Image (cartoon, rainbow, N blue to C red):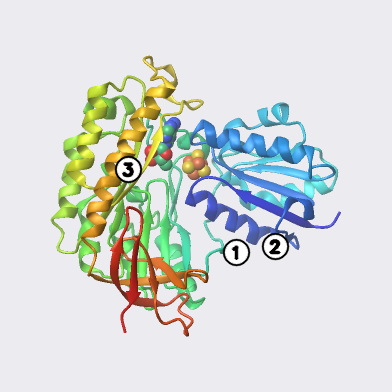
Amino acid sequence: MEKTFYIETFGCQMNAHDSEKVIGTLIDQGYAQRETPEEANYIFYNTCSIRDKAEQKVFNRLMHLKKSAGRGKVLGLLGCVAQQEGEKIFERAPYISLVAGSASYTKLPEMLRQLEAGDRRVTGLSLDTEETFDTPLTRRDNPYKAFLTIIEGCDKACAYCVVPFTRGPERSRTAASVVDEAKRLVDQGYTEVQLLGQNVNSYRDPSPTGWDFATLLNEVGNIPGMKRVRFTTSHPRDFVKPIIDAIESNPNLCNHVHLPVQSGSDYVLGAMDRLYTREQYMQRIEWMKNSKRPIAITTDIILGFPGETEEDFQQTLDLLDEVEYDALFAFKYSPRPNTAALQFEDHIPEEEKTRRIQMLLERQRAIQIRKNSELVGAVEEVHVEGRHEMLNQWTGKTTSHHTLNFTGRDSEDLLGRYVNVRVLRAGPNSLTGEAVQ
Ligand code: 5AD
Ligand code: SF4
């Protein structure tokens, strides 16, 4: 059988980066990547199970594939649904031959060899594998910004969250290996990296150097040629002041922090087992607001967690006004397998979750319109990532992670470059401007 594969990715940046590692590994083994499932013999779905909808999407896609392009092909399920459902997948979708969680990707070549040798089904589901984190084979998708894993897994136990089950316990990568990869990225031409982990703040170098996250962040930001360092995701409990001090003093560290709050109500935060109160969360916000360098703040919010009353919800709305986030992601609570919240009572009806999420998004939209309009007239440095030919516009991000589309310098190739842009107009989700001569 011709060694060709197709891969499709669902879910978060961690998953997107895992796919880059899988692609590199397969190409190294002589497999060629194809753009459509029809053209490939091996079809992989790298799946997400954070919410029920994400999981359903995967199974719908599989059903569809089975009916159309699937015949005679080898189907593999990777990622969080694979890890969560394990061998049960074979009952639900008997046409699948390979099931592997994210901790098993280094074993993929071996698993494929087993299939080629005639095995009908192979699995890679162990979570206690000794990871090397060394990923010289990674095939990065984005030529301008590189993902870089610093920590895998999660040791928290938020009552709603499937991640500790799908990605296992925390394992930090050695600082030497992180810095090494970051330097290699600069050599390849990258000037921006995004450090990745489920909870980057609890990073701790396992080697005797023992660096914490703030130290690692600073060191990566000090690599010659590195212009921008971002990181996701942060847990408020482990988000300490030295991280802000580092951002304040090192201009290569982007002035943007994604700090998921989930709820503005202490009752709900307690029920979620988030390990902080609203007051403790607000203290972190105050640190950032008092920073000499302005820091953009974004968050995640869950609406309709079991037992969330109208008053709890109002407290979340009130928190939006207090923090004035630059952007946020809002989700309706979705019950997940294995999680503590499955046992909770007082589930909120779907229509009520919808009402709450709509109200929240409306409130946030007004905040973004107002906050973004304050940027009109400012000159921001944009890392150019794209070009809309039809609109005659370049597009990219500011250090604070605002999308800024701009006109000017049409005759040049600005892709990958840093350009000063004056903001002329502001919408709720993006800014427009023109290049400063
Ligand atoms: N239901 C809804 N949203 C969830 N998230 C995580 N688990 C759930 C769930 N069961 C959200 C959280 C998290 C983001 C990545 O997804 O807000 O920060
Ligand atoms: Fe989805 Fe969480 Fe897995 Fe990322 S880690 S793919 S968000 S379930």
Label 2 beta carbon less than 8 Å to ligand 2? no
Q: Residue at x 21, y 38 (%)?
A: 319
Q: Residue at x 31, y 70 (%)?
A: 252
Q: Is residue 18 left or right of residue 171?
A: right
- Looking at the rendering, which quadrant does residue 354 occupy? top left
Q: Are marks 3 and 2 in contact (CB under 8 Å)?
A: no
Q: Residue most toward the top?
A: 345
> Identity of the amino acid at label 3?
Pro
Viewer-side label of 3, 1: 3
Q: Residues within 10 Å of mark 1 (few under 14, many from 20)?
A: some
Q: Residues within 10 Å of mark 2 (few under 14, many from 20)?
A: some
> Identity of the amino acid at label 1?
Arg
Viewer-side label of 3, 2: 3
Image coordinates for residue 117, horizontal then vertical, percent: 84, 47
Q: Residue at x 86, y 54 (%)?
A: 1
Give the mark, 3 or 2, whose residue is nearer the N terminus.
2
Q: Residues within 10 Å of mark 3 (few under 14, many from 20)?
A: some
**Residue tagged by mark 3?**
260
**Residue tagged by mark 1?**
139
Image coordinates for residue 275, horizontal then vertical, percent: 27, 33
Image coordinates for residue 341, horizontal then vertical, percent: 40, 23
Q: Is residue 207 left or right of residue 236?
A: right
Label 3 beta carbon less than 8 Å to ligand 1? yes
Q: CA distance from mark 3 to mark 1?
A: 29 Å
Q: Residue at x 46, y 63 (%)?
A: 177
> Identity of the amino acid at label 2?
Ile
Q: Is residue 403 visible?
A: yes
- Looking at the rendering, which quadrant does residue 63 occupy? top right
Q: Are marks 1 and 2 in contact (CB under 8 Å)?
A: yes
Q: Residue most toward the front?
A: 390
**Residue tagged by mark 2?**
27
Image coordinates for residue 300, horizontal then vertical, percent: 35, 42
